[in-house]
Amino acid sequence: MSATTAHSIVEASPRAKTVAGAIVILYALITILPLLWICATAFKSQSDAISYPPKLLFTPTLEGFVDLFTVQTRQPPDFIAKLPPAKSWYEKLARERGMVIAGPSPVVGRFVNSLIVGFGSTILATLLGTLAAYGFSRFRVPLADDLLFFILSTRMMPPIAVAVPIYLMYRWLNLYDTQIGLILLYSAVNVSLAVWLLKGFIDEIPREYEEAALVDGYTRLQAFRKVVLPQAATGIAATAIFCLIFSWNEYAFALLLTSANAQTMPPFIPFIIGEGGQNWPAVAAATTLFLTPIVFVTILLRKHLLRGITFGAVRR
């Protein structure tokens, strides 16, 4: 009998794996190239950042970060020569370019606002979404399908459609230019996404686990906290990442509903203007600083994110 070669319809062939791997690597390089270019621009000088053709090899400098964190004014050389010696390396760097540091810039406050608003709204939306998703998954809710569709429809509405009413409401409630105002608004927008994602995760958790806990004397709340939450931790982490990405990057409401006190990084970065034109190293430095927390959180929770996306895809 002649030998026959069996081919699995489940496992891909070596050639298919090679092609798929090459496509994934090519896609990763294309998508990560702009981020690498932004990070490189943050360490360029102003002349290197606007040079043509673009420079791939350059001498790194921290001019962009100094310009980002300080407010500077240009002074004549005789004025700078009369000043006392520079007390810090960044002050010396500024004077070498004919600039004098007048004080700190508001970037630190804007970054702190982004942290408070982003993580605060993520925690609140995930908490409310988890409770609502558990209720829809485990109890008989009248008109549950209609309610779920109504919750999802709030996510479909474009922000510009409700921008003016929300602005007027926030002015009347004294929530304009406050951190709590943005946290409540972002939480309201993210709750719909959290409910729909987490309901799918909780539906996959067998009810028998809770019933066994209730038989053992647990209350409904104790069963939810000790049985359901550990099982749904992967889905909660994945949902939190999606909510954080929206809150972290949101621009329209942050621009409309803040002016100074609660302004976040997205509306602040475009207005980093340098003397004589756009200060691209400072803009790139702000963008790099802005990307760092979200990249760190995503890498930290990447296992939960991958498991959360594929959770329930394979029935057993």
Image (tube, rainbow, N blue to C red):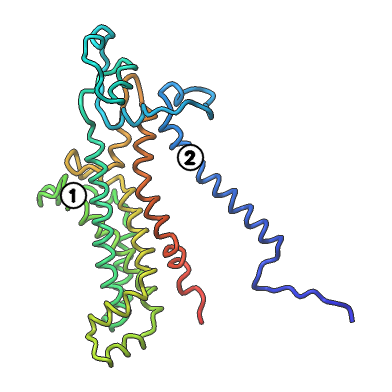
Which residue is situated farthest in the top direction here?
A: 78
Please give the name of the residue rendered at 29% of the width and 45% of the height, measured from the top-left corner. Answer: 252
Q: Position of residue 168 (x, y in %)?
A: 15, 48
Question: Where is the N terminus found, in terms of image quarters?
Answer: bottom right
Circle 1 residue: 179
Q: How many marks?
A: 2
Q: Is residue 162 above or below residue 95?
A: below
Amino acid identity at mark 1: Gln
Please give the name of the residue rendered at 26% of the width and 61% of the height, measured from the top-left corner. Answer: 123
Nearest to the observer: residue 105 or residue 172: 105
Which residue is situated farthest in the right direction here?
A: 1
User: Which quadrant of the structure image shows residue 228?
Assistant: bottom left
What number is the disc on residue 36? 2
User: Which quadrant of the structure image shows residue 190?
Assistant: bottom left
Q: Is residue 198 above or below residue 101?
A: below
**Mark 1 neighbour density, 10 Å: few (under 14) some (14–19) many (20 or more):** many
| Camera-side mark, 1 or 2 | 2
Please give the name of the residue rendered at 58% of the width and 53% of the height, measured from the top-left corner. Answer: 24
Mark 1 or 2, nearer chain start: 2
Q: Position of residue 78 (x, y in %)?
A: 25, 6
